[in-house]
């Protein structure tokens, strides 16, 4: 671990939030690096000094001003909140989305038709021995292929 | 008395000696000729055959080299317009292999058995149409005329000595030509090695057989209400009912046969994409050593009944399909 990395991890070490391996590496570095050890001591001193001070309370005026702003924000009239919804771009997008949903629903729930060629191939399969049929059907139909009829 | 008995014995002996010669000369009855033609030939042969199919105003021609060795070894090489082998079909009676030369796919599937040719004797009139010389061989011509209107008529040129069909012509019920297949060269005494009928050494794709339903109870629940009809009009008998996967669902495929023609009735839970609901389609060319079931253009008709979608496919006229449709809709 070099000095830059070590300095990044010093606050974590103070808060005891380090992984074991990394902490070991940091402590090895601090044992040989006077500069980093000095910085750690400084941080520890500041922390101890802060802990000795009594807690600081927020002034009442500031507290009241924040609460007032928050109230104004959440209590805004309904019309202004729906203003974005009524914007044409938003409305068209919503309609488009709904239409796509309906089409998707219709497509997947409606009985999907089976091409006639599929049944022609099955008819052929029932009587075919000479396999000329496959060629004829294949030529007649873009849907037909050999694959649906066979399994490995 | 004794003289009469001697006379009778003499006549019988004469009959035994002369009958085969009479038959060889092509005097078999149309029925015997037909039965000889639909069985596998008794002699080996190899030759080149041309099959022409008409559908509407279009036609399609295919040339194939054919090898046959009794009792049931058969090989057909389908040729491209350049004369290269596109596909090889090999049968040994129980199994069929299809070798796609371009894609290098070898498909294995069960051969068909028990073809109901005898039913044809009930549904077709067999008419003798005399004799004709085909490629130097004397053939007897029989015509299979359907008893019901709307079915195609077939004419066969049969070599009476071995049952080989040298030419076949199929005409639609309106008199238009449907299919003609004939040999352009044939060798009746070829020396065919057995390994000619072996499939190539390649990974095999096994064609999965369809599930068979034996009765209504074995159909998907949504189809339990549809009538299970073992016979239709025009002499069609039910030969099989199979289940065809349609994604998560299944359609039912009822296969009917009148002895020569195959009629398919599909019952689907999903609509069938076709426009218009009835029209002419290209069916198939079917072949085997007897190649009597050669088919070509056909018709389809579709309707909705009881929440399911019905489809009839067959090489019958549109009017005949309509009659069958009405029969299915109102079986009583």
Image (cartoon, rainbow, N blue to C red):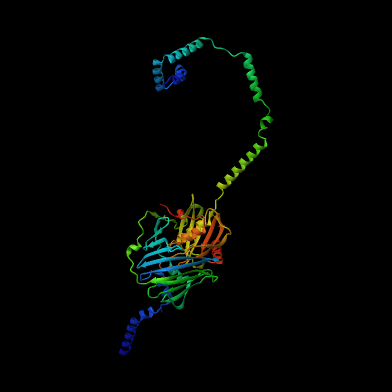
Q: Residue at x 63, y 19 (%)?
A: A66
Q: Quadrant of the N terminus of chain B?
A: bottom left
In which quarter of the view is residue B183 placed?
bottom left
In which quarter of the view is residue B240 placed?
bottom left
Q: Residue at x 33, y 81 (%)?
A: B17
Q: Nearer the viewer, residue A65 or B2?
A: A65
In the image, B6: left or right of A142?
Answer: left
Where in the figure is residue A100, as x and y percent of width and height?
Answer: 60, 43
Q: Residue at x 67, y 32 (%)?
A: A82
In the image, A54: left or right of B45?
Answer: right
Q: Nearer the viewer, residue A10 or B288?
A: A10
In the image, B143: left or right of A105?
Answer: left
Compared to residue B29, the image places residue A36 above or below, namely above
Where in the figure is residue B121, as x and y percent of width and height?
Answer: 45, 71
Where in the figure is residue A81, as x and y percent of width and height?
Answer: 66, 30
Label tally: 0
Compared to residue B18, the image places residue A79 above or below, namely above
Compared to residue A50, the image places residue A107 above or below, namely below
Where in the figure is residue A151, as x and y percent of width and height?
Answer: 42, 52
Q: Quadrant of the C terminus of chain B?
A: bottom right
Q: Nearer the viewer, residue B11 or B25?
A: B25
Q: Nearer the viewer, residue A56 or A6?
A: A6
Whether residue B226 is visible: no
Whether residue A35 is visible: yes
């Amino acid at each position: 671990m070099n000095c830059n990395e070590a300095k990044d991890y010093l606050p974590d070490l103070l808060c005891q939030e380090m992984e074991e391996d990394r902490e070991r590496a940091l402590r090895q570095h601090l044992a040989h690096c006077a500069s980093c050890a000095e910085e750690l001591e400084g941080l520890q001193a500041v922390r101890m000094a802060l802990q000795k001070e009594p807690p600081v309370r927020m002034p009442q005026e500031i507290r009241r001003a924040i609460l007032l702003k928050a109230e104004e924000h959440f209590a805004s009239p309904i019309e202004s909140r729906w203003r974005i919804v009524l914007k044409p771009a938003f409305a068209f997008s919503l309609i488009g989305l709904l239409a796509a949903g309906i089409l998707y629903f219709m497509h997947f729930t409606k009985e999907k038709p089976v091409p006639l060629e599929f049944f022609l191939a099955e008819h052929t399969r029932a009587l075919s021995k000479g396999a000329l049929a496959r060629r004829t059907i294949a030529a007649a139909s873009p849907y037909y292929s050999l694959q649906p009829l066979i399994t490995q | 008395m004794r003289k009469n008995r001697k006379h009778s014995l003499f006549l019988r002996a004469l009959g035994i000696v002369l009958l085969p010669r009479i038959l060889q000369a092509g005097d078999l009855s149309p029925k015997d000729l037909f039965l000889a033609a639909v069985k596998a030939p008794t002699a080996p042969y190899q030759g080149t055959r041309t099959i022409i199919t008409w559908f509407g105003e279009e036609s399609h021609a295919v040339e194939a080299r054919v090898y046959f060795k009794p009792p049931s070894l058969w090989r057909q090489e389908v040729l491209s317009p350049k004369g290269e082998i596109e596909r090889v079909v090999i049968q040994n009676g129980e199994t069929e292999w299809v070798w796609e030369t371009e894609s290098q796919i070898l498909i294995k599937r069960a051969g068909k058995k028990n073809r109901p040719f005898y039913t044809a004797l009930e549904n077709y009139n067999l008419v003798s149409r005399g004799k004709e010389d085909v490629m130097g061989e004397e053939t007897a011509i029989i015509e299979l005329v359907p008893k019901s209107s709307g079915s195609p008529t077939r004419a066969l040129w049969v070599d009476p000595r071995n049952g080989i069909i040298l030419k076949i012509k199929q005409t639609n019920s309106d008199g238009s030509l449907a299919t003609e297949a004939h040999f352009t060269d044939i060798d009746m005494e070829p020396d065919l090695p057995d390994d000619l009928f072996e499939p190539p050494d390649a990974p095999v794709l096994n064609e999965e057989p369809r599930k068979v339903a034996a009765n209504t109870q074995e159909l998907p629940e949504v189809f339990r209400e549809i009538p299970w009809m073992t016979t239709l009009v025009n002499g069609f008998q039910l030969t099989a009912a199979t289940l065809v996967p349609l994604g998560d669902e299944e359609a039912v495929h009822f296969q009917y046969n009148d002895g020569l023609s195959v009629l398919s009735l599909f019952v689907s839970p999903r609509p069938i994409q076709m426009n218009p609901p009835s029209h002419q389609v290209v069916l198939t060319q079917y072949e085997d050593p007897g190649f009597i079931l050669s088919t070509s253009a056909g018709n389809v008709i579709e309707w909705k009944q009881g929440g399911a979608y019905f489809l009839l496919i067959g090489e019958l006229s549109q009017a005949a399909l309509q009659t069958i449709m009405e029969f299915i809709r109102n079986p009583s």
